[in-house]
Image: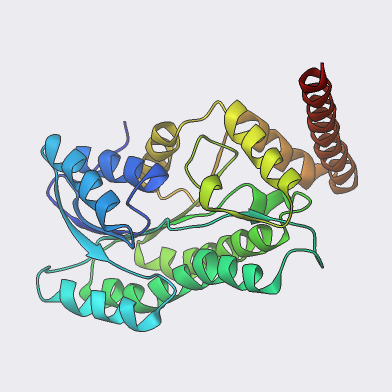
Amino acid sequence: MSASPNKPRNAILTGAAGGLGRALAVRLAQDGWRLALTDLDEAGLAETLELVEAIGGQGECELLDVTDSSAWVQLRDRLQNRWPRLDLLVNNAGVCGAGTVGEFPLEDWQWILATNLQGPIYGCHTMVPWMTEQGGAAYVMNVASVAGLIAPPTMGAYNVAKAGLIALSETLYNELYPQGFGVTVVCPGFFRSNLIPNGRFSNERGREQAEEFNATARLTAAWVADRAVRAMYRRKLYVVDGLRARLLWRIKRQAPGMFHRLLSASIARVDRQLTQRAASENFTKRQ
C-alpha cells in the first residue's frame, strides 16, 4: 500500500452523511485522519461518526450547506480555532438529475451546478489559501464522475458540473504541484449509491434508466473510496474507476467520433430494453 499519514492529520469531508462520503470517512479514519464530517443531514452525519469512532477514528460533525460561500468561511474560522492545520479537503457532496437540454428545468440546472460545481469552487477558494499559507504539503480531492469526461445524453447539467470540476482540479494541480501538493479528481463510473431517490428527473424514463444503471453497477462505494485514497497518497491526478468507464474514456481520446456514436447507441439500447420491459409488464397485468 502507498504511504499513509504516520500521525493524525486533519481533513474536511463534504457529503459525509452517507454513500461515498461515508465510505471515504471510514477509509480515511482507518489511516488515522481526524475528520470534520460535513453535510446537511444531521442524523446521517451522526451515523457516519459512529462508524468512524467504532474503528478508533476521530471526527466531529459540522452542518454545512456547500452552496453558501459564507458557511464555508464560518467553517474555516471554527476549525482554525481548534486545528493547527488543514491537510486535506475532500469535495464529495453532490446531487444528480437527468433530462435533455431544453427539457430539463433551468431551476434544476441551477440546483445541480450550485451543489456539484459551485460548492467545490467555494471550498477550494476558502480552504486552499489556509493550506498553502500554513506551509508543508497537503491534498485536495474532488469527486467528479466519468460523466464529466464522456458527456452521456440526457445528463447535460450533471455532465457540465462534473466537467467543470475536472477542469478546476486540473487547474489546481498545475498551480499546487510545484508546492508539493497532491490534487486528485475521482471519476467513477456507475456505482451503487443513494443519490437517485433524491435526484431530479424531467421524466420517469430518465429515472428508470438511472435506476437500471444503479441496480446493475458492480462497483461499490467502499471500493471507489479505497481507490481514491490510494491514488491521493500517490498524488495521482485522475482516478477513473470501473473497466467500462476506463474503456470509454480511452476510446473517446483515440476516436472521438466513433465514441459518441457508440455511446448514443448504447443509451438507446437501454431505452429500448426499458420500453420492452414496461410493455411486457403491462401485458402481464392485463392477463
Query: Residue 218 location in percent, x, y?
Result: 55, 25
- Relative side of 228 to 158, left or right: left
As drawn, 195 above or below 125:
above
On the image, the x and y values in percent for residue 13 come to 31, 57
Quarter of the image with the N terminus is: top left
Q: Is residue 145 visible?
A: yes
Q: Is residue 238 visible?
A: no
Q: Which residue occupies 28% across, 71% down?
A: 131
Splitting the image into 4 quarters, where does residue 30 fall? top left
Q: Residue at x 58, y 65 (%)?
A: 112
Task: Report which quarter residue 261 is drawn in.
Answer: top right
For this orientation, the residue located farthest to the bottom is 70
Front residue of 214 and 73: 214
- Residue 188 pos. (x, y %): 55, 42
Picture quarter with the C terminus: top right
Q: Residue at x 9, y 70 (%)?
A: 82
In the image shown, does 202 or 123 lie closer to the viewer? 202
Residue 271, above or below 104: above
Q: Residue shown at 42%/68% (left/top)?
A: 176
Left or right of 172 in this view: 62: left
Figure quadrant of residue 36: bottom left
Q: Is residue 286 above or below residue 76?
A: above
Count of numbered circles on the image: 0
Q: Please state the horizontal and vertical placement of residue 171, each as a whole percent of the image.
A: 54, 69
168 or 13, nearer to the observer: 13
- Give the left or right position of residue 150, taking residue 129 as reference: right
Q: How has the structure been colored for display?
A: rainbow
